[in-house]
Image (spheres, grey):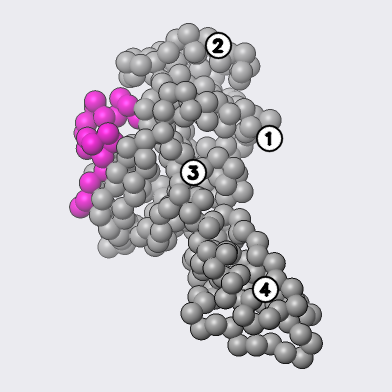
C-alpha cells in the first residue's frame, strides 16, 4: 500500500503541496487527477524519492521512501520526461535497470521484444517520442515492481500501443498484485482502467474514493415539466449545476441516483431521466462547475 500523510512542500514561498493525503490500496490502479499546477508531479517526485518532504510522510509498504534504497527497489516509475543516458541504447539501459533492481526479469525482457519491436541497439535519443515511451514501458515492467508510478504514461503512443501497454499493466495487477498510481489528463482513458480516483487541487486532495462510489454519488438528471410550470425543487437536493434547452432542464446533483429520482418525482415531471456522469464531468463539477467550464469569448 502507498500512503501519503499530511504532505507539505514549499518552493520559494509557493506551497506546491498543502497537507495532501492519499491512500493507494495494494493491487489497485489509482488515478491521480487535477488541473495544471495542482501538485501532481510534485507528489509523484515524493513518491519516487526525489524530493524530501518539508513535513508529512510518504510510505510504500509501510516504509518511508526518501533515502531508503530497499523501498525504492520496489518502485518503478515512468515520468513524463523519462531519463536515459545520452548515448544509451535500450540494451544499455536494460543493463542499468538490471543492476538497480534485484527483481529485474531478463526472460520477460526477451519476450517483450516481440511486443514492442524496437531497435534494441539504436540510440534512444534518436528515437521518436512514442518509441522512447515504449522503451520506458519495456524496461519498467521488466523490473517486476510492487509499485508502478506513472506520469502521463501513454502520451505520444498510438491507439494500438496504448491498448497494448494498458493490457500488460492490468495483467500485472491481476496476476501479480502490482499497485499502479497513474497521473493523467486523459480522464476518458483513466475511467476505463482505474478503480480508485483522487482529485488534487491547489496542493490539497479534494476527495478520494473508489470510482464506483464516486460515480454513484453524483448524477445528471434531465427533466421536462408541464408547459408553463417550473416547480421549486426540494431544498435538500444539492444542485451543482442547472441548464435548460427548450423545455428540457438538466441538473447536476450530488447524491445517489435512486434517492434523487424519488425526491424529484414529487415535483410530478412529465419526464425524468437519470444518467451517470463520466469522470471528466465529475472532475469539472467537483472543481467548481462553471468556474472550470469552457467559456465562450467574443471578439
Find numbered disc 1 in the image and state the secondary structure of the residue it sits on. Answer: helix
Q: Which residue is mark 1?
A: 159
Report, in whole angstroms, how far the alpha carbon at label 2 lies from the one at label 1: 22 Å
Distance between mark 4 and mark 3 Cα atoms: 28 Å
Q: Nearer the viewer, residue 195 or 79?
A: 195
Secondary element at tag 4: strand
| Residue 230 point in image, percent of width and height | 69, 87
Q: Is residue 240 magenta?
A: no
Q: What segment carries the magenta color?
A: 55-76
Task: Tell me which label, 3 or 1, sits earlier in the chain.
Answer: 1
Q: Residue furthest bottom?
A: 228
Look at the image and tell me whether residue 11 can be seen: no
Q: Earlier in the sequence, mark 4 or mark 3?
A: 3
Which disc is residue 250 wearing? 4
- Locate residue 192, reporting x and y percent: 59, 42
Residue depicted at x 56% and y 15%: 112
Residue corresponding to mark 2 = 111
As rendered, which of 246 and 289 lies closer to the eye?
246
Q: Closer to the N terminus: mark 2 or mark 1? A: 2
Amino acid at each position: 500500500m502507498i500512503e501519503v500523510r499530511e504532505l507539505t512542500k514549499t518552493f520559494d514561498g509557493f506551497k506546491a503541496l498543502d497537507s495532501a493525503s492519499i491512500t493507494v490500496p495494494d493491487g489497485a490502479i489509482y488515478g491521480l487527477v487535477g488541473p495544471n499546477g495542482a501538485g501532481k508531479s510534485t507528489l509523484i517526485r515524493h513518491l519516487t524519492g526525489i524530493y524530501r518532504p518539508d513535513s508529512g510522510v510518504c510510505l510504500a509498504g509501510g516504509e518511508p521512501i526518501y533515502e531508503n534504497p530497499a523501498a525504492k527497489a520496489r518502485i518503478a516509475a515512468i515520468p513524463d520526461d523519462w531519463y536515459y543516458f545520452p548515448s544509451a541504447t535500450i540494451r544499455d539501459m536494460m543493463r542499468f535497470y538490471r543492476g538497480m533492481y534485484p527483481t529485474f526479469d531478463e526472460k520477460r525482457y526477451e519476450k517483450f521484444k516481440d511486443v514492442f519491436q524496437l531497435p534494441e541497439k539504436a540510440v534512444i535519443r534518436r528515437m521518436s517520442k512514442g518509441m522512447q515511451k515504449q522503451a520506458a514501458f519495456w524496461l519498467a515492467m521488466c523490473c517486476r515492481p510492487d509499485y508502478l508510478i506513472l506520469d502521463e504514461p501513454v502520451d505520444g503512443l498510438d491507439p494500438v500501443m496504448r491498448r497494448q501497454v494498458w493490457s500488460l499493466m492490468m495483467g500485472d495487477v491481476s496476476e501479480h498484485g502490482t499497485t499502479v498510481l497513474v497521473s493523467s489528463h486523459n480522464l476518458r482513458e483513466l475511467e476505463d482502467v482505474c478503480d480508485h480516483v483522487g482529485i488534487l487541487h491547489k496542493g490539497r486532495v479534494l476527495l478520494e474514493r473508489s470510482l464506483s462510489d464516486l460515480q454513484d454519488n453524483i448524477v445528471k438528471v434531465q427533466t421536462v415539466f408541464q408547459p408553463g410550470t417550473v416547480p421549486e425543487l426540494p431544498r435538500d437536493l444539492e444542485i451543482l449545476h442547472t441548464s435548460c434547452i427548450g423545455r428540457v432542464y438538466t441538473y447536476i446533483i450530488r447524491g445517489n441516483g435512486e434517492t434523487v429520482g424519488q425526491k424529484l418525482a414529487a415535483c410530478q415531471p412529465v419526464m425524468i431521466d437519470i444518467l451517470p456522469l463520466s469522470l471528466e464531468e465529475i472532475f469539472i463539477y467537483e472543481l467548481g462547475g462553471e468556474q472550470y467550464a469552457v467559456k465562450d469569448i467574443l471578439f
